Image: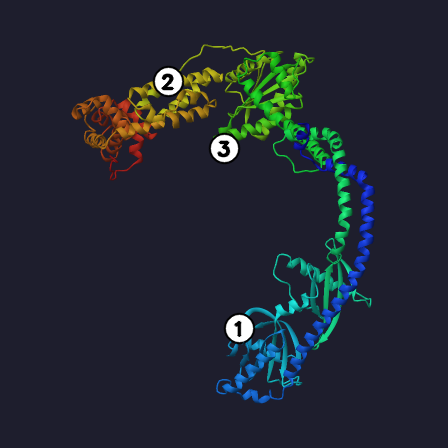
Amino acid sequence: MEMNMLLSKSRGTIFWKNLGIVLLITCIPIAVIGVIIYYIGTERIETEVNKAHQNQLQSSIQQLTDDLANLEHSVVRLAFDRSLDETLKKLDFVQEFQTTNELMKSFSLITESNSLINSVNLYLRGSDKIIGDEAGFHSVRTDEDRNLLNALLDTERTIYWNYSLKKLNMPDSLNKAIIIKLPGGQMYGSFGMFIIYLDQNKLNTMVQKLVSGEGVAFLFNENGDYLTTLPSHEDSQELLTLEDALKSQISVQNTNENMFKFDWHHQKYNVSYGKIAKLGSKWTVVSATPISQIVAPVTSLSKFILWISVFGLTMGLALSWFASNKIYDPIHRLKSLFESSRNNKLNEKDEITYIEHQWKMQLQVEQDLSIQIKQSIPALRESFLLQFLQGNLYTHTESELIQKLKQLDWDVAYKRFAIMVAQFHGISDLGGKFSERDAQLVTFAASNIIKELSTEKANLVHIINFQDLSIGVLFVLDPNSSDEAIKANFNKLAHDYIVAINNVLNLKVTIVTSRITDSMKDIPKILEQTRKALRFRDHHTSNQMLDMSQFMLTTTSQNHFPFELEREIVHTVSMGLEDEAMRLIKQFMLELQKNNNAELMVHQGMMKLLGTIHHAIIKHESNLFALYGGVHLYEQLMQLSEPDQIVEWFQYKLIRPFVKTLTITYDSHLREIVDNLILQMQKDILLDVSLEMYADQLQMSPSKLSKAFKQINGINFIDTIVRMRIEKCKELLVTTDLKINDIAEQLHYQPSYLIRMFKKSEDITPRQYREKHTQSSYTSPF
């Protein structure tokens, strides 16, 4: 069972290295003897085999030379054949079929007489014809082929090689070919040429006979061009690289010997080469055979020695296996410990390297976690303090709160605490510099300013951004500082902060400082009280500093609520007179501020006005949900503190939506009634008329008629009558000689009342108006 457990362990390089050292020490004598015998025997055999291989290579090179000499003979005979003269230019290959057939037969005989020739082709420049034993007779069809053939003819040499010539009927092939210009021996002005294509496969086979097995043989010319090609298989690229290396090595050989040894990819080759000069070119034939292949016969002699070595190694393995496991066991346990702690195991065979890498990773992870914790502590502390100041951690004890903050890098044990709250005013008085939407941005800028100033006064400071043009600051104070020193520092900080906000943001500030406490549990309650104290700021003072420890709500006079204005506001709102209602609301705000300087009292007065208007709107049977979209009006008003904001809220959020719905209720029929009533009043201007009289005529209640008249006409009934009679008075003063008493009698006014009303309207008396205007045509606007 113990053996099975040991075998189940994964082994790394350390185990196998240790085991190998033990085995080498155990078997080194046998290994040394085997190696000496092996190398002494193989060296002698290698010498004899190399001699035999060299003789065979020389014989093969001579055979290759003979084949090329035969090819050369065939080429020269063809080049200087007297029957192939210029008469061929005039030969009609179609009409003189017999001559054409004999040429093709002679080409076939040449091909069959030499195994290296694949095909023979004849090209005549003037006729643009080409004939061969393989493709037969055909014309040159493309300019590309014609240019290729003419370029071959224009070469200065009479007989020469081309190592990458394509066949006309096989445009993608590259062939070795011999070019023979006609007539033979003429370098310029040739009328045609023979193109002898070599059989690449037979040439490769002939050269490859120089070697066997895994050896390589090839043929290249003086320009380094290969006359042989490699077969297409997966090792061809590697063999081509070997050929290039051998070719480079032969070019730098300075010895007269035609053989040398060459190392390539951890294998040693025995290389032999020879020179061949035929057909105007010089070739080098190279044969490279692995020495291991040459000395293969010696391996049988050394097998016995190897088997003895293997037996000794096996015995050493059996004897050292258990000892190696005992040595390796601590390393294995440590490695397993790391692997069990990670989901993804590294593919590392060296246990020591693996353990070192894992240890470094653990240290890096620990360092990264430490950095992340340090970076996240401020955010965690912000979140914790936010929950704490909102009163959500009321279940925590004092010690738990102190311990939690200590974990968040705040040591607040035996410390004192205080709160400062600031409210910003006057954002609507900046002439467009800030809008109401910029409240959060302004509050953020102000919080940054107080943060910079506060950190100079205390080490531990927490800024609370309420996102509503107000901020709070929590100070952790030194317990050794006196209350007087702390208050002095707070006053200095408040003064500096007010100056900074005035200069940078052009806003006014109200600052309230709380009482100092020794208990953290009291801080949420103190914060709530301090924020509430902002409501007691004086509306008539721009910048204020309030101290909660000395704060007392006192009144010097009895508060007076403007009930009359409240009734007038409700009446104008009920009639849909938005402009008049807003004028009265502004006056109402001024009355509240005059009687109550504290913001809280003014705000409570506006809340009562909201309740009264809200009650009046309900009496009109309006759908409040459709009118205000389900908005909580009282909650919205509670969020506002600036007088201008409150007045604008009353206009745009409360009154205007109601007035719009109220205006819609006055239909076109009622407007027509009011328009006809105005025309009737112009006709009855000299009569003693009243609202009740017209209401009886129209069969309407006086209140409904009065409300509709003012809603549609914009002016109430009495003011309209007075304006019409003033205009009539002006007409009578200019067009008649009636005295003012007579005119007043016609208009059903007392003379003194008419004169007073006329002067109020025109800023002059009736007499002055008559004197100013001459008797001229006058048409009343009514």
Question: What percent of the width, then of the height, locates residue 14?
Answer: 74, 36
Q: Amino acid at mark 2?
A: Gly
- First reached walking from the N terminus: tag 2 or tag 3: 3
Please, what secondary structure does the residue beneath circle 1 have? loop
Please, what secondary structure does the residue beneath circle 2 have? helix
Q: Which residue is mark 1?
A: 169
- First reached walking from the N terminus: tag 1 or tag 2: 1
Instruction: Find residue 592 and report its image quarter.
Output: top left
Q: Nearer the viewer, residue 474 or 34?
A: 34
Q: Amino acid at mark 3?
A: Gly
Q: Nearer the viewer, mark 3 or mark 1?
A: 1
- Within-10-Å neighbours for mark 1: few <14, some 14–19, many 20+: few
Q: Is residue 717 visible?
A: no
- Within-10-Å neighbours for mark 2: few <14, some 14–19, many 20+: some
Q: Which residue is mark 2?
A: 611
Q: Is residue 225 visible?
A: yes
Quadrant the C terminus occupies:
top left
Q: Which residue is mark 3?
A: 431
Residue 561 to residue 280: above or below: above
Instruction: Find residue 245 and report its image quarter.
Output: bottom right
